Image (spheres, coloured by chain):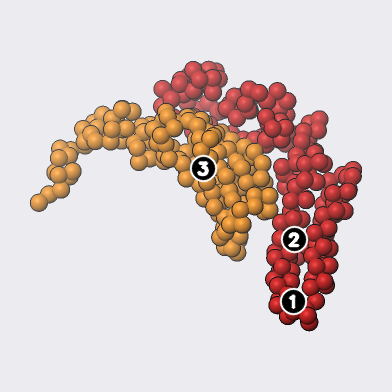
Chain colours: A red, B orange
Amino acid sequence: MKIIYTNENGGVNLVFAANKKDIEFTLKSMPLFFLEKEVLNNRLPQSVVDNLISDLASELSDDDWQAIVIMQSVPSYAKDFVILADDYVLPDREFRNAWKIEVNTIGHDLDKAKAIQLERVRFAREPKLAELDREYMIEDEKGVDGDKAAVTARKKLLRDITEPLKALIPTSIDDIKNAFPLSLRE
Amino acid sequence: MANSAFSNTGGIGTQPATKAQQEAGSSNAVYTSPATQQNHPSANKGWAYYDTATGIGASYNVTSNTDNGTNNHTITWTVAFSSTNYCAVACPKADAADTAASSWSAQIANSNFNTTSTQIFTTNSNGNTSVGEVNHTFVVAQGAQ
């Protein structure tokens, strides 16, 4: 079982429930005192504890499993939580922090995705800029024979490499994925 | 000379330890039963192995693993700890070639370290949390419930 909800920052939290049998085993192995405490703290339905007391061989129902997961893992501020269909395939995680809830599925906030991609471009550019700084110093030490202008031109190209992405008005997440500069791909 | 801990047993008791006796961990007059063994301070109180993309592989005393974002997860305990004076440890698992996790580490969050849940951050050595993700993580916790 997977549940999504919008968090306080507008992002999406994805709850992966533990296996129903594992939760059932945990509950059956716990002293009653512990379970009653969780009922008092509104973390377990009373009916689950009652069922366990009356028949230790009873199995946790799907409804009880779902109720426990929601009570314990979905915060009260999450008004928009959605239980994903069992056969729903999660999107790839390349732009995980740009996820947003779209009806009963996960979509992408394209502005956030663009900002993430820009950060990645800058991160990939960093070592190349450092290398050009080194080359510039070498040319500088050569004095009149040095070709600092050529290195400067390459540095400007690298600095401007974010401009196409900055100017992009994406209509899909693929537009942003494809906007990563080829020259920075390894 | 006999070790005092062993010379003092006086035989095994016929009554199972209560929760308090098991937590105290000092009685030789009662025995440990499956129902109370986990109350001993040395016992593991919860654990999980989770995959970042597909969720929990196996667990005990865990209700869920919440993916809060890249390299940011929360484990929710089915039965809570009695206070935040408990110990939680998390560790990334290496990839199949035993290389990918070598530069990753896991941290237990300070701000969201609660009796009911434990938040875990994973970071790589370059310090940039938006580049890459840990695939698998182990977490265990011990303390009083």
Q: Which mark is residue A139?
A: 1
**Cβ–Cβ below 8 Å for labels 1 and 3?**
no
State whether residue A78 appears in this view.
yes
Tell me where residue B17 appears, x and y as whole percent.
29, 30
Task: Measure the C-alpha gap from mark 1 to mark 3.
Answer: 48 Å
Badge 2 density bin: few <14, some 14–19, many ≥20, Cα 10 Å: some
Q: In this view, does B128 lie to the left or right of B145?
A: right
Task: Residue B20: give its label.
Answer: none
Residue name at image x 15 percent, y 48 percent? B3
Disc 3 residue type (three-letter)? Ile
Q: Mark 3 points at which residue?
A: B108
Tell me the element at label 3.
Answer: strand
Circle 1 or circle 3, nearest the eye: 1
Who's the residue at 51% across and 42% down the image?
Answer: B108
Tag on residue A125? 2
* Residues tagged 2 and 3 counted as in contact (Cβ below 8 A): no
Secondary structure of the residue carrying tag 2 is helix
Mark 2 is on which residue type? Arg
- SS for dot 1: helix
